[in-house]
Image (spheres, grey):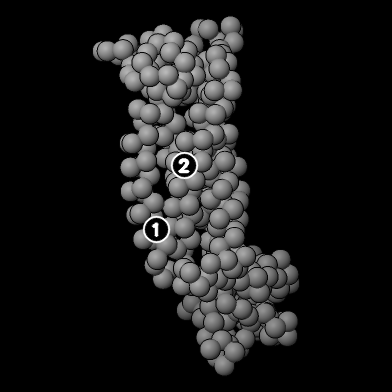
Amino acid sequence: MRAQFPSTSAPAIVVATGPAQERTAFAQAAARLQTLVAARGIAHPPFSVTASRDGRALSIELPLTGAGNNGSSRAAIATLRRELVPQTLRRVPGAQTAVTGAAAEDVDFTRQMEHGTPYVIAFVLGLAFMLLLVTFRSIVVPLKAIVLNLLSVGAAYGVLTLVFQRHWAQGLLGFHSDGAVVAWLPLFLFVVLFGLSMDYHVFILSRVREAVDSGMETDAAVRYGIVRTAGVVTSAALVMVGVFSLFASLSSLDLKQAGVGLAAAVLIDATIVRAVLLPASMKLLGRWNWYLPGWLGWLPGAGAGRTQPSAAPTPFAAGTPAGTPS
């Protein structure tokens, strides 16, 4: 369709304002811009020019080469902004110009996401570290939680790359990949998955710390915490995977990508990360799990897991080696 009707593709809209006495110069600059755009092949005529009654403003619609959201369209926007508009309309004295339209909005949104993502990630990681540090009074727990949560998010990014950029499982999921992941999805996945993963982590660790505070050795406390929380964590994960998988079945590529990323991340997090890596790392670290440097002793404790259980934790009595029935 684009090959047969190139002038109906998504347009870039060039707008300009300036003094009324420069209306003639504006018209000449607009004509020059259209000539250069056609000669460079970044847009297809016919072009639509609209001017205000007083001649102080005009807009030019330039149907862009490409699909409107691919590399060709983005390159066309960059050429307009950096070269052609400055060479024409911006040379008119007192002129102010801008390039907008769907393709330009896509370029600007992607740039803003790239600019803001590091700040969002730093804020989320810093806040999570401080909350876990105060809650469990340990410097090891928050560091380990951040690493494990980043593993889940990284796994989700890897699945998205395989499925939607490397064209894997297209037939299985019933879609045709455009070779890209939508710009808003990586940051969206990060904040959602980090929150979900932190829920699991705090839920499990609270039971482990509860057992440690009741007198259990760390190995037995880890087993106690996993046993106590396994049913809830598994059930919640199955529900979320089922819901997110429905999004993966939709025809919208954006929602399909979100569904695949969320479902894969929750499944990996609830099985490999929380059921294997978390208890394994806690067993290896032993009492170092609860290490707090002396210079941080002034920190207040939020008291997670510090309330003594109403009865001795079961099925493993305090100090009973893992694997031995109480």
Tag 2: residue type? Thr
Q: Nearer the viewer, residue 71 or 153?
A: 153
Q: Which residue is mark 2?
A: 271
- Label 2 crowd bin: few (<14), some (14–19), many (20+), radius 10 Å: some
Badge 1 marks a residue whose secondary structure is helix
Query: Amino acid type of disc 1?
Result: Ser
The residue nearer to you, when weighing 217 against 55, is 217
Spatial separation of the CA atoms under disc 2 and disc 1: 17 Å
Q: Which mark is residue 245?
A: 1
In the visual, does 61 lie left or right of 94?
Answer: left
Residue 56 in picture, x, y percent from top left: 54, 72
Q: Secondary structure at mark 2?
A: helix
Instruction: Residue 254 in the image: state x and y as whole percent.
Output: 46, 63
Q: Quadrant of the C terminus?
A: top left
Residue most extreme to the front: 324
Which of the 4 quarters of the picture holds residue 166? Answer: bottom right
Residue drawn at the location 33% of the way across and 42% of the way down: 235
The residue positioned farthest toward the left in the image shown: 310
